[in-house]
Image: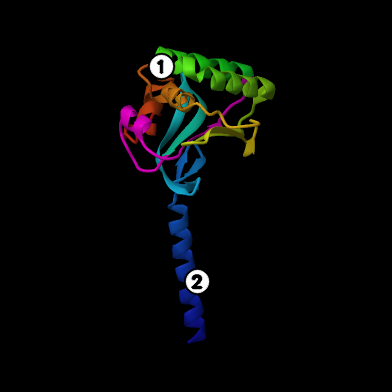
Amino acid sequence: MRAFIVAALVAVGSLSGGSAWAETVEVANVKYETAMDLAGQKLVLNGAGVRYKFVVKVYTAGLYLTHKVSTTPEVLAAPGPKRIHIQMLREIDGNELGKLFTKGMEANAPRDEFVKSINGVLKLSEVFASRKQLNSGDNFTVDYVPGLGSTLLVNGKSLLSEPIKEPEFFTALLRIWLGDKPADDALKEALLGIKRERRR
């Protein structure tokens, strides 16, 4: 009888382990949790995908919001904290990445929004320039909390002395991937949770 109970508990443990694994989404061998806490609020993974340059995988990106939405205006208008998490899949010069992000923000953000974002753009560029190089496996996260601003973590460590207070910065940042001229059309759809046939 005791052996039966032990076997049953092991089986239950195996099932619970399986459900725990089901709480992540894997993109290019990078796992994204489907739910997380930020500033005391629960966020859900709105979508995750891969940034391609031609046929080369550059990085994965995951977008977290308080609830799922499927359009750019809904993402930008969504209340509460937000997170964009990126993990590198190949080496890239940090200064180059900072310049690409700046160009992406300028190309997609309305002029007045970009102007209000300049303080944050300069800080972001300084951080990436100081990194020299981002390697495969490195990651960075930008969190936005209303009333506090945006914080930047590289490999889990904060690299800003204080948050970027302008809310326009985070909105302009998201437009890199979700704007009218996104960095990658397929990644835009993935972040918005729109399913498409997997690229081979």
Residue 198 visible here:
no
180 horizontally vs 14: left or right: left
Relative image position of residue 71 (x, y in whole percent): 31, 30
Q: Nearer the viewer, residue 100 or 83?
A: 83
Residue occupying image coordinates x 41% and y 40%? 80
Relative image position of residue 5 (x, y in whole percent): 48, 81
Indicate the quadrant containing the C terminus: top left, top right, bottom left or bottom right.
Answer: top left
Relative image position of residue 23 (x, y in whole percent): 44, 51
User: Taking 160 as reference, is 30 above or below it?
Assistant: below
> Which kind of residue does numbered mark 2 sit on?
Val
Residue occupying image coordinates x 58% and y 32%? 163
Secondary structure of the residue carrying tag 1 is helix
> Which kind of residue does numbered mark 1 sit on?
Asn
User: Badge 1 is on which residue?
Assistant: 108
Q: Nearer the viewer, residue 99 or 89?
A: 99
User: Taking 181 as reference, is 140 above or below it?
Assistant: below
* Mark 2 burial class by Cα count in 10 Å: few <14, some 14-19, many 20+: few
Q: Residue farthest to the front?
A: 147
Part of the protein shown in magenta: 65-94
Give me the disc on residue 10. Answer: 2
